[in-house]
Image (tube, helix red, strand yellow):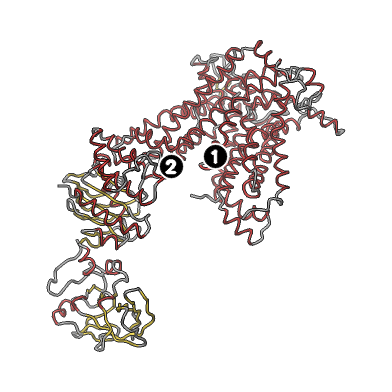
Amino acid sequence: MNGIIFENVCKSYGETAVVKDLNMTIQEGERLILLGPSGCGKTTTLRMVAGLENITAGTLKMGGQVVNTVEPGARNIAMVFQNYALYPHMTIWENITFGLFIQKIPIEEIKARTKQALEILNLSGYEQRKPNELSGGQKQRVALCRSLVKQAPYFLLDEPLSNLDAQLRLQARTELVKIHNLYRPTFIYVTHDQVEAMTVGQRIAIMNQGALQQLDTPDVIYQRPANTFVASFIGSPPMNLLQGAFRDGALWIAGSRVNPPTKWHTLLAEHQELWIGIRPEQCCLSDTPMLHGQIEFVEHLGSQRCIHLRLHQDGQRLLCMLPADQPIPTGTVGVSFSWQHVNGFDGHVGKNIGLPNKISHNYAC
Amino acid sequence: MKINSYRDWYWHILLLLAVVIQLWPLLFMLSTSFKTMDQIFLSTLNPLPAKPVIDNYLYVLKNLPLVQYIVNTLLIASSITLAKIITSILAGFAFVYYEFSHKEKLFNTLLLTFFIPITVVMMPNYLLISKLGLLNTPWGVILPQLADGMGIFLMRQSMRNIPKPLLEAGRLENASPWVILTRIILPLIKPSVIAMGIVFFINSWNDYFWPLLILHDKPTYTLPLALQMFISAEGGSEWGIAMAVAMLTALPPLLLYLTCQRFIMNTFMQSGVKG
Amino acid sequence: MNRFTWQSALFLAPATITLLLFAYWPLLQDVWLSFHSWNMVSPTMKFVGLQNYLQLLSSDELIKILLNTVLYILVLVCVNFIFPYLLSFIIAHRLNRFSFFYRSALFIPSTVSLAVASILFLWILNPLAGPLNIILSAIGLESPRWFKESGLVIIVIGLIIGWKVFGYNLILLVAAMVDVPKELIEAARLENVSNWQLFRRIIVPMTSSTALYVFVITVVFGLQYVLVPVNMLTQGGPDQGSSNLVYIVYQYGFVFFQTGKASAFAILTMLIYALFLIVKTKVLDKKVHYEN
C-alpha cells in the first residue's frame, strides 16, 4: 500500500493560494505526471509529497499514514531535482552513496547497489569524477542513479529533463520508463512539456492556477478533455474551440446551421451557450461543408499543413490539418467534421458536457 | 573590445602615483628599521641603506620580551578568529536552514550590533571584565571582541548562495542538520570561511584598543600595544628601534595577505563583502 | 516544527549570547551610567538625572569636538569614499592590463595595524628630522608641526586613517564595479559616451548599493578608528584640537574617571549613529538600486 492520497490539500504563502483544495489519489506503482503551465502549483504539490513544503490545510497520506508532519528524511523518498542538485565537492561515487551511508546500509550492499545502478545508467567508469567534469546528460543520469540506489517506494522527479537538449530528452524519456519498470516505485513526475507527459505517463494530472483540472490516462485527456483549459492546453496545435448556441433543434456556429445527430439534442439543449471543441486533425475540407471560412495562411509542418481559417460572419478562427501531399487550397473553403470526435463545453463554466450515451460521466477526478 | 593599450597611459600614471603614496611609507619603515642611528639622520630618504644592519632587531630581542609579546598576540588573535568563525557559521546556518518566527527581526537585531560604536561598549565591558577578574589576562581582551555581527552576515550570505536543492537533497537522505552543515555546506563555502578567517585574524592581530584597556602589566602586552612604549613626548630619537618593532608587528598580517592575496582577492571579488 | 525551534536556538545561542552580553547589555548599562555620577572605583554611585547631559550640551568643548568630528569625517569621505570610487572605476573598466597588480598593491596598507600606522607617520611627519620635512625643505617649504596645530592635527589624523582604510574600501568598490555587465559599458561606448557620462549615468546607478555600504562603513567605522592614533600620538591635544566624539568618551572614562559624562557622550554618539542610519534607510536606500 504505497499509494499517495491528497485530501483537501491546500498550500498558501500568506495570502496567495498556490494549491487549492486538492483531492487526488496516486496508485501504488504507477507513473503519474503532474502537468501544467508554470506557476500552476505542480512543483509545490511534488514538494509537499517530499515534505519540503508544509501543508497549509488538508491531509496527505502516504502508504496509508498521514504524513503532514513527517520529516522529509523519514518519508523514504527518492527525488531528482530540476538542476540535479549534485554535490559539487563530492565525486560521483560519493554523491550516489552519500544517502546510503547515512542510512547505515552495510558497505557490501552499498557497493552492489551502486555498481548495478551505474551499469544500468551507463555510468561505469565515472565514479571518481566530479560533477562539473560531466556533460548535462551524464549529470542527469547521475541524479537518477542517486535516486535509484535508494530503492525507495516513492520516486519524485521535478522537471528532470528540462535542462537537456531535444535529442537527449528523447533518449532520457525511454530510459525513465525503463528505470520505473525495474522495481515499479510510485513515480511522480512534474513537467510542463505535454509530449513528455504523454510519452512517460500512465496517468496525467493536469493543474492550472493551483487546482486539479483532470486526472486520467493520456488517451482520455487528449480525446475527452474535462474542460476548455485542458482542451486548449493539450495538443499542438491546440483544439479548436468554437463559440456556438443551440437553438431551434440545431447548433449555430458562426451563423451557420449545423445539424447534430439527434442523440446529441437533449444534451446540447441543457446548455444554451456552448464551446464546440474539435481537434484540427479531425477537421477536413469538404464539398458538403458545415462551416465556411476564408484561408488566412498556411503553415508547413513537414508531414502536414496547418490551415488557418477565419470563419464567415463572426470571424472566429479555425485550424485545420491537411496531409502535405494535398494541393494547397486558396480563397474560401468549406470545412466539415465528424461528430464522434466532437467535445462540447458549457459556454459559462467551460466544463465538458459529456457524451450523449453517458450523460452523467464526469471527467474531472 | 579591448581598449587601445597606448591610450590608457594616463590612467597608469594616476594609479602608479596612488601606489607610491600607499607603499612608500611601508618601504620607508622597512629601510629605517635596517639603518643605524647615523644613517637614519644623515641619509633619511635613502631607501636602500648602504650597509643594512640588524642591530635594531637584535636590540629589541635583547631588551624586550618580544617572544612573549608575539605569543600573547598570536594567542589572542587566533582565539578570537576561531571563536568568531565557529559562532558565525552556527548562527549563519540557523538563519539559512531553519524557518522560525521573527527570523528577519532577530537577524537584523544581531546585525545592528555592527553599528554600536566601541565608545558605547568600552566602559561597561571594561567594568564587566574587571568584575570577572580578567584584567591583565588574554581572556579579558578576547571576550568583548567576540561580539561581532559581521561574521553572521557574511556566513549567511555565502550559505544563501548554495542552491537550496542541495540542502533539500540532504534532508531527503535523512541527513541531520549537523551532517548537512559539515558535509554539504562547509565544503562548499570553505573559501569564504578561510577569507573571513584571514580578515578576522588580521583585525584581531592589529587591534590596539582592547589590549590598551585591559592589559596593564608589561608582560601581558600585545605587539601593537608594545609600540606605544616607543613614543616619547617630542619625537623620541629611537626611530630605528621603533620601526623594527613596527615591522615585526606589521609583518605577520602582511605575509598572510601576500601569500593568500590571489585567494583573498578572488573571494572578495566573487561573494564580496558587499552590503 | 518544535524540534526545529530548539535546534535553531542551539545553533544561534553562542552568537546571540555574546552579542547580547557584550553589545546590547553595555548599551543599556551606558544609559544607566549616564544618569549617575561615579568615578569607576567608589563603591557608591550618585543619581544625578539629566545633569551629565546638560553639562555636556552647555560645555564649550562640545562645539569644538563636533567641529573636529565633522572635519575628520569629511577627510575620510574624500579619501576613503570618493577617491576609491573613482579609482575603482578606472581599475575595473578603463584598464586592460595590470589591474590585479593595482588592486593588490593598493590593498596592502589595510593589513597594517593602526598602531603601526600611527608610529610610522609620527616618524614620517617628524618636523625636525622626518623624511617629509626633508622633502618639503628641499623644495623650499617649511614643515608645519603637524600634530601640534589645532585644525591641522585632526586632518592629519584623518589622512593617516585614510591611508590605512583606502585599499579595503577600494576592493569592495572594485568588486561592485566588476559586476556591472560589460555589455552595458560597450553599448554606452557605441553611443560615444564620455567617461564622465558613463560613470555618472551607468556606473553610479549600477553600483549604488555597494557605494552606499562603503559610505556607511566609512563614516561609522572611520569614526571609531580615530581612537588609536589620537590615543597614541596626541591624547586629544593640542588643547583638545584632536579630540572628537569618540576619543572624548575614552578621555572622560579612562583618563578623568567621570563615567557619567563619558556615558553621556557615548549615548550622544549612539544617537547620532541612529539618526544617520535612519536617514540611510529612509532616504538613501530608496534612491539606491538593489539587485535583489
Residue C92: x and y, percent? 62, 47
Residue B95 seen in render? yes
Q: Classify 10 Å Cα crowding around label 2: few (below 14), some (14-19), many (20 and above).
A: some
Identity of the residue furthest to the top in this view:
B62
**The quadrant where residue B126 appears:** top right
| Residue at 21 percent of width and 80 percent of height | A338
What amino acid type should be assigned to the residue bearing mark 2? Arg
Residue B22 - label: none
User: Is C8 in front, or is C26?
Assistant: C8
What amino acid type should be assigned to the residue bearing mark 1? Phe
Q: How many marks?
A: 2
* Mark nearer the viewer, 2 or 1: 1
- Asked if disc 2 and disc 1 are in contact, CB closer than 8 Å, the reply is no
| Residue at 61 percent of width and 23 percent of height | B208
* Numbered disc 1: secondary structure: helix
Identity of the residue furthest to the front in this view:
A125
Is residue C59 shown left or right of residue B147?
right
Residue B268 - label: 1
Residue C279 seen in render? no
Residue A216: x and y, percent? 20, 62
| Residue at 22 percent of width and 81 percent of height | A246
**The quadrant where residue A332 appears:** bottom left
Above or below for C173 versus B120 = below
* Numbered disc 2: secondary structure: helix
Label 2 resides on the chain identified as B
**The quadrant where residue A221 appears:** bottom left
Identity of the residue furthest to the right in this view:
C140
Above or below for B27 versus A39 = above
Specify the quadrant that holds the C terminus of chain A. Answer: bottom left
Is residue A106 shown left or right of residue A83?
left
Which is more N-terminal, label 1 or label 2?
A: 2
Which residue bears the numbered disc 2? B160
